[in-house]
Image (cartoon, grey):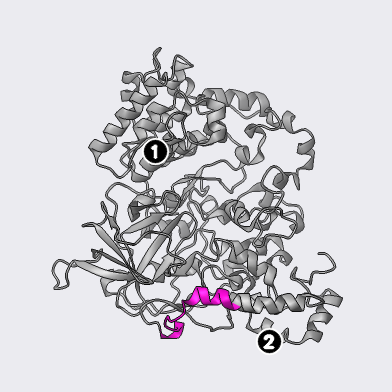
Amino acid sequence: MGKDRGHDGMPSPSGPTWFVAGLAVVSGALGWAVMTGREGALPEAAVTNRPIEVRSDGYLSSGTCATCHPAQYATWFGSYHRSMTQVATPETVLADFDGVQVSAEHGGPMTLERRGDEFWAEFDDPDWDPTGAVPRRIARQVVMITGSHHQQVYWYPTGRDRLLGQLPAMYLIREERWISRPSAFLRPPEYAESETGRWNLSCVNCHATHGTGELEASLDGPPREWRASTTVAEFGIACEACHGPSELHREVNTNPLRRYWLHLTGRSDPTTVFPLGLESRLSSQVCGQCHSVWLGQTPSEGLAYRPGDDLTDTRDLVQPSREMGTPRMQEILAQAPTFVEDHFWPDGMVRVSGREYNGLIDSPCYLNAAEESERLSCLSCHTMHKTADDPRSIEEWADTHQVTSGMYGNGACLQCHATLGQTLTTHTRHEAESSGSSCYNCHMPYTSYGLLRAQRSHEISSPTVAATLETGRPNACNLCHLDRTLEWTSRYLEEWYGTPRPPLDADQQQIAASVLWSLSGDAGNRALTAWSMGWAPAQDASGTSWMLPYLGLGLDDPYDAVRFIAGRSLASLPGFADFSYDFLGSTEQRLEATAAAMATWRTLGGAGPRREAPLLLNANGLPRAVEWQRLLLLRDHRRVRLLE
């Protein structure tokens, strides 16, 4: 650290810092006012119809941290971690509620209304009991929000203490539209389950800081009978989620002599946790407390993990790559037969977003480090606070996944693999500035799914066709070279890297892998392939003129999420920026949109004869119907329900 920074990377209390800290008290108080309510609103302690923030168990709030650490507070406040759960106010609600009617949702249409600073919705009760006397149609005030980057989910009071229900529709921020909640996830057609109590039981664990409170019901009973007394230390992922409870830290550091002594001696402060000062394994576990797959634990007494602890002592993590066939895994699957396939590929590689820790700890850069200081960690690439030398705005830093300055490109890998930087093109066999020379694209490809898009795998691996055949997981080469076959990939991997060539059937030798995934793959592979067709590096490597028939097929996919992704990728093709399509429209409307897209495509010249054989297009650039039909009959219709 520089000479003006304390032992924990925070500003030392010297010189102008006292003045800045004084200003921070005001800014922190203002931020706290925004988070806890508006002028004239009920004090937090007086609110009875939703979870509330309570100072307990040594937790104080990030507003307290702002007093001495204003720069860190400012970057955290601009992050999406901070706003993952918020009280519903005119400042936090992004959707239009002013007389809006949302159709195609659970039951009848949902009617939205703005009442001053309050947001109301009238809708069919998702937990309605037709045998009871309670009316099906209900009106509820929106009191809380989850999500602030891609989507916003809106929660309403159920009247059973602090138990929350969820509106049957959610809001897509970028698209500025409402969709049914099941449509926002990769789930089977007609899939539906109650979301009542979801926040109190599950979301509170990772979308808030130190959630506690009893859930008073049998989880086997109907949600309409549940009650909850949920409280949190703070809404959102706040300072104390990563640094631990701060009450003692504040108390002892009111003494300036102590602070100066720690600063001058360079000693650590045992009253707080500085993740960068932990060994790599423990620092990654600070992130892994949320970014991992673990068996459900109710927040009745608060989760026991504190930053700096060994996560495995208190969190029941699941890692199928190491546990397949064990008695524990057999017990898990006996209770939840689809648990593994809902989260992982068949070989145990995680396949859903938000669970990056599972990928990290199976990566060779984590497993094979000779020294702990050399072990890859989450903080090798990401930072929770934008540093002063980072030229990006806080908004840009947050939008780029809080990747540390200089680590967004190959710099992240070249920290350890410096020699590869000197012979990059010899290793990659691609031009230096091309997407094929990106370490990420080959070793962390887009094989995970979440938030209606493909996400990068966080298990560092090398592409092999054998893994694709064994697991069904697309490989990095064919996710970029969408117009090439598995045989083509296998041949080059053997020639360049000595990777063994597995036996391939006729289709795998002669038909582009993306075509096989689009026509005969399961819903997960269809989603990843459709997303890749809208990914600029894949479009550059493969061309786009041939993609329309496959994206057009996706416009009428049985899975809502696949249709959404196909429509978005189609709109990225030349000539389709203004293409009109509603992925939640009727079957007739979707087929009409597909026909219109094909007509536009033919007007633009179609695919032409370019490599028609592996792409199953005839000499006129149109689909070869017999081959298409044959592969469609082989489609994998297994149920896919990815739990991101």
Q: Position of residue 230 (x, y in %)?
A: 42, 77
- Nearest the viewer among 602 and 477 is 602
x, y percent for residue 267: 81, 75
Q: Quadrant of the C terminus?
A: bottom left
Q: Is residue 591 above or below residue 270?
A: above
Q: Is residue 496 left or right of residue 626?
A: right
Judged by depth in the image, the label closer to the viewer, 2 or 1, is 1
Circle 2 sits in a helix, a strand or a loop, which is it?
helix
Callout 1: 10 Å neighbours few (<14), some, many (20+)?
Answer: many
The residue at the point 32 percent across, 42 percent down is 582
Q: Which residues, given as a range, are shown in magenta?
A: 29-46
Residue 44, given in percent of the width and then of the height, sits at 45, 82
Q: Is residue 229 above or below residue 460?
A: below
**Which amino acid type corresponds to the residue marked 1 in the rendered image?**
Gly
Determine which quarter of the picture holds residue 79.
Answer: bottom right
- Which one is in front, 285 or 544? 544
Q: Which residue is mark 1?
A: 567
